[in-house]
């Protein structure tokens, strides 16, 4: 059975790459660009948050509200905003190798965490 976190992450990365593929590789970094290392940590936390909420099996509308609230808390913890996060994702998507490398780190981290849980 496929890990839904990995499927989600890869789907998001692919979608972003496909929607941005026609933009110039010379894109200017946005104001408030979230650094790569921070983006990796934030993406990991966002995917874990989403997985935890999915595991509750609450109604989709309630789950979406809860996810937005928890994501907002994560943005604060990482000293960013939803707008800066989204602008940073678009920027990194234009630079496909950046996003690809970042998501490779995200997937690796999630796989390690999943492995640790499987061993318990």
Image (tube, rainbow, N blue to C red):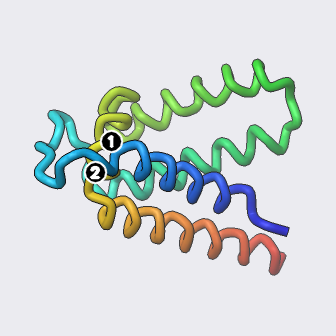
- Would you identify the image quadrant in which residue 119 lies? bottom right
- Label 1, secondary structure: give it: helix
- Asked whether 103 or 39 is in front, the reply is 103
Residue 9, x across and y down, in percent: 57, 55
Figure disc tally: 2
Q: CA distance from mark 1 to mark 2?
A: 6 Å
- Label 2, secondary structure: give it: helix
Q: Are marks 1 and 2 in contact (CB under 8 Å)?
A: yes
Q: Give the position of the N terminus as an image quadrant.
A: bottom right
Residue 106 shown left or right of residue 32 in the figure? right
**Which residue is found at the position 28% from the left and 47% from the top?**
22
Residue 28, x across and y down, in percent: 11, 43
**Which residue is found at the position 35% from the left and 29% from the top?**
81
**Which residue is found at the position 17% from the left and 49% from the top?**
24
Farthest front residue in view: 22
Residue 19, x across and y down, in percent: 41, 43
Residue 33 shown left or right of residue 107 in the figure? left
Q: Give the position of the C terminus as an image quadrant.
A: bottom right
Binning the other alpha carbons within 10 Å of mark 1 as few (below 14), some (14 to 19) or many (20 upward) gives some
Question: Residue 105: which numbered mark, if any?
Answer: none
Residue 96, x across and y down, in percent: 32, 60
- Asked whether 84 or 120 is in front, the reply is 84
User: Mark 2 highlights which residue?
Assistant: 94
Residue 18 shown left or right of residue 71 in the figure? left
User: Mark 1 highlights which residue?
Assistant: 90
**Which residue is found at the position 72% from the left and 77% from the top?**
115
Binning the other alpha carbons within 10 Å of mark 2 as few (below 14), some (14 to 19) or many (20 upward) gives many
Looking at the picture, does residue 30 appear above or below residue 2?
above
């Amino acid at each position: 059975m496929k890990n839904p976190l990995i499927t989600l992450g890869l789907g998001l990365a692919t979608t972003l790459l496909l929607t941005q593929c026609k933009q110039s590789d010379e894109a200017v970094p946005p104001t408030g660009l979230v650094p790569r290392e921070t983006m990796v940590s934030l993406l990991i936390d966002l995917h874990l948050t989403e997985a935890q909420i999915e595991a509750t099996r609450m109604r989709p509308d309630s789950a979406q509200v809860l996810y937005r609230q928890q994501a907002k808390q994560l943005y604060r913890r990482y000293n960013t905003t939803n707008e800066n996060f989204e602008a940073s994702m678009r920027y990194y998507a234009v630079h496909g190798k950046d996003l690809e490398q970042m998501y490779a780190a995200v997937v690796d981290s999630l796989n390690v965490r999943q492995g640790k849980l499987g061993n318990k």
